[in-house]
Amino acid sequence: MSRLAVRFPLFASIVLMTAALGCSGISKSVTSPASAVPLSASPSALSFSTPTPNTAAQQNVSVQNAGTSRIVVQSISVSGSSAFSVVKTNLPLSLQSGQSVNVAIAFDPSTTGSFNGSLVVASNSADTISVPLVGTVGAPPIAVSMSPAQAVLQVGATQQFTAIVSGTTNKSVSWYVNGVKSGNASDGTVNSSGLYTAPASVPSGGVVSLTAVSAADTTKSAAASVTLAASGQPVNVTISPTSASVQGDATQQFTAKVSGTSNKSVNWLVNGTKGGSSTNGIISSTGVYTAPACPANNTATVTALSAYATSASASAAVSLTPAPLNSTDRYVATNGSDSNDGSACKPWATLQKASSSAKPASTIHIMAGTYSLSSTLSTSNSGTASAPITFVGTDYDLAARNWPVKIVHTGTASTVWAITGAYVTIEGIDLSSNYAGTYNGIKSSAAYTVVKNSHIHNIVNDGEGACVVGGSGSDYYTVVNNEINDCGTSIGATAGKLIHGIYLHGYYSTIQNNLIYRASGIGIQLYSYGVGHPNQEPWHSIITNNTIFYCGKGIIATADQNGFSDYNDIGNNIVAFLVDVNSPSYGIYNSGAHYGTHNTIEYNLVWSVPDARYIGTGLTYTHDVNADPQFVNYQNNGTGDYHLAIGSAGIDAGTPHGAPSIDFEGTVRPQGAAPDIGAYESH
C-alpha cells in the first residue's frame, strides 16, 4: 500500500460528536484573554509505535467546543516531523456548543527512529490548541534487570541472583564476576542459572561485582554488588516453631531469625531440598509449609538456612498425617478406585464418580494425569451461593501455561463436560476432544457456572458450538483466565465453520483475561436464543481485558428476534490478526436491530481485521486504539509470547472501569498509570 493511500483512507474520518471530553495537559495559545469559545482536546497527547518503517498507524483526537457560542475551526495542521499527517478534512468546520470533532492523525514513517510533532488546531475565536505527537519505529529496546541488587555473604556461602531480560524473546544471559565469565576461585563463581558461590577467603576490597549480560545484545547488562565477610563472626539461626503436626493439604507458618550479620535472609528447605517437593511437602519463600495430601512418609524436616553463611541453620521436625475424610474434600487420581472413599490416600478413579458424589461445598481435587472420557462427563448436582461445588486440577501454572490435569474425550459425544447443576466451578484443567464430532467443550445450562484458570482446546467439529458454551438458564456465567484455542477446523482456510471460543446466552456474564485464538467462528459471542427463549438475553455482561487473535471474528454482543442486548461493558480487549473464515470478518460488531443504547464499548485495541474493525446498527465506541499490539513474540498457533512489548500502544492505555484486579497470570493490575489492554499486564 502506498504512503498516500494509507494517509488518506477516509474522507469522512472527522465526525461530529456530543460527548464532553477533558483537556488537561494540552498546550493552548489564546490571543484574546476574553475568549468565550475555548477549544479543548482529548487525549492530551498521542504516542505511536510501529515495528518497521512504512507500517502505518492511525489514532483520533477529539476536539471540542467547550464554550457557549458557535465556533469555526479554520485550520487543522501538523507541525514537526513529516511522518505525521492529518487525514483529509473539509474546512472551515462549524461546531455548536458542546459539539466535538474527531481528527484522525496518521503516523507513517519511512525510516526507523524517534519522531516528534504537534497537531495544531486554530479557530475564529483566536483559541489555538497544540497536541504533542510522539512516534517510534523499530524493535522495542532490550533491557536487563537483576534481583537482588546487592547481597552480603560470608565466605563459602551461596546466593541466587535472577536476571530479567525485556524487549526480546531471547531471555538468555551470560554471567560474570568482576568481569570474568563464570568467575574464578579468588572472587567467587557463578553458574548459568545465576547461583553465586562466594570464595573461600575475602578478596581484596571485600566487594565483588556480579553482572548479567544479554545474549541478544551484549551492550545491555545489569549488575549487583556482593559484600563478602570472613567466617570468624558467629552467625546464629533460630526457627519457630521447632516442631509441628500437620495434616495433609494443611499449612504451617514457620519463621526464622538470623543474628550475627546484617543479612537476615534465609533459604527454606524441606528434607534438604530448596522449596520442598510434592512428596515431602512444599515451602514458600516466606516459610509457609504445605503438607502433601497423602504423605509418603510420617515425618519431614523444615530447615531455615542462612543466605549469609551456609554453616548456620535451624530445623524443625514436622509430623505428617493424611488429610482427613471430611464433608468437603475429595480426591481423584489415575491410580485410584471408585470403590474407595475418595480421601487423599484412597482417591476415586473417575471424574464421573466424583461428579455424582459431589455435594454443596465439595472440593474435588483432581491429581495430575490424563483422564479419558468415553462419554460426556455430566455434573447435575448443585452447590449454593455460599457453598459451591468446585473441581480443581492440581499444580497448574498459568505463567508457564501448563496444566498437568488432562481431560480428553475419546468417545463419540457432542459435548465433553455438561453442567446442569447450579453453582459449579471448574478450575485448573486441560480439556480437549479427540473426536471430530464434538462441538462443545464445557457446556452449562445452569446459573452461576465458573470456568477459570483452565485450557480448553481442540473442539473441532464443523457444526455450531464453542469451546465454552452457555445454554438456556446459564445466567451469571463467569469465564476468566483461560486459554481457549483451536475451536473449529481449518482455521483461516475453509468457510462455514461456526465453532466459537466462548458462546454465552443470558444475563450477567463475566468474561475476562482470556487468551483466545484459532476459533473458526467468533472469539467471544453473547447472543440470545430469540423466539421461545425471551429471557435468554445478553444484558449486564462484562467483557474486558481479553486477548483474541487469529479467529474468524472478534467480539459480538447482540440479540435476535425476541431477545435484546443492552447494558454490556466491552473494554480493554485486544482483537488482532483475524482471518476471513466466515466472510466478512469484523473486529467488534452487532447484527440485527435488537441492540440497546446503554452498551459501553471503549478502550479496545482492534488491529489487522480483514473487513471492518467496528460495525453494526447502533454500535458506538470510544477511546479506540488503532495500532499493532506489538506482542513480545506473535505466533498465530499459540506458541508465542502474548505479553505486550515495550513501546506497545496497549500499555497503560486501558480504563479501570470493568478491569479485573489481576491479569491472566496473577499480576496485580494496573502496574502503571492505567491498566494495560489485553489479558496481560506488563511489569
Image: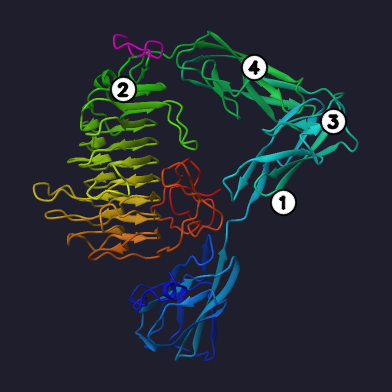
Rounded to the nearest angstrom, the CA distance separating label 4 from label 3 is 25 Å
Query: To which quarter of the image does residue 212 belong?
Result: top right
Q: Is residue 56 left or right of residue 555?
A: right
Which marked residue is nearer to the observer: mark 2 or mark 4? 2
Residue type of the residue flagged with mark 3: Ala
Residue at left offset 82%, top offset 38%: 208
Residue type of the residue flagged with mark 4: Gly
Please tell me which residue lies in front, 656 or 645.
Answer: 645
Whether pointer 2 and pointer 3 mark residues with C-beta atoms closer than 8 Å, the reply is no
Label 1, on which residue?
Answer: 219
Q: Position of residue 64 (x, y in %)?
A: 41, 78
* Number of residues whose C-alpha sits closer than 10 Å to that of mark 4, classed few (under 14), some (14–19) or many (20 or more): few
Rounded to the nearest angstrom, the CA distance separating label 2 from label 4 is 37 Å
Whether pointer 2 and pointer 4 mark residues with C-beta atoms closer than 8 Å, the reply is no
* Range of magenta residues: 335-347
Disc with the residue nearer the chain's start (2 vs 3) = 3
Disc with the residue nearer the chain's start (3 vs 1) = 1
* Number of residues whose C-alpha sits closer than 10 Å to that of mark 3, classed few (under 14), some (14–19) or many (20 or more): many
Q: Is residue 133 left or right of residue 180?
A: left
Q: Considering the numbered disc 2 on the image, is that residue within a helix, a strand or a loop?
A: strand
Label 3, on which residue?
Answer: 229
Residue at left offset 43%, top offset 14%: 323
Disc with the residue nearer the chain's start (4 vs 3) = 3
Label 4, on which residue?
Answer: 272
Which marked residue is nearer to the observer: mark 4 or mark 3? 4
Label 2, on which residue?
Answer: 372
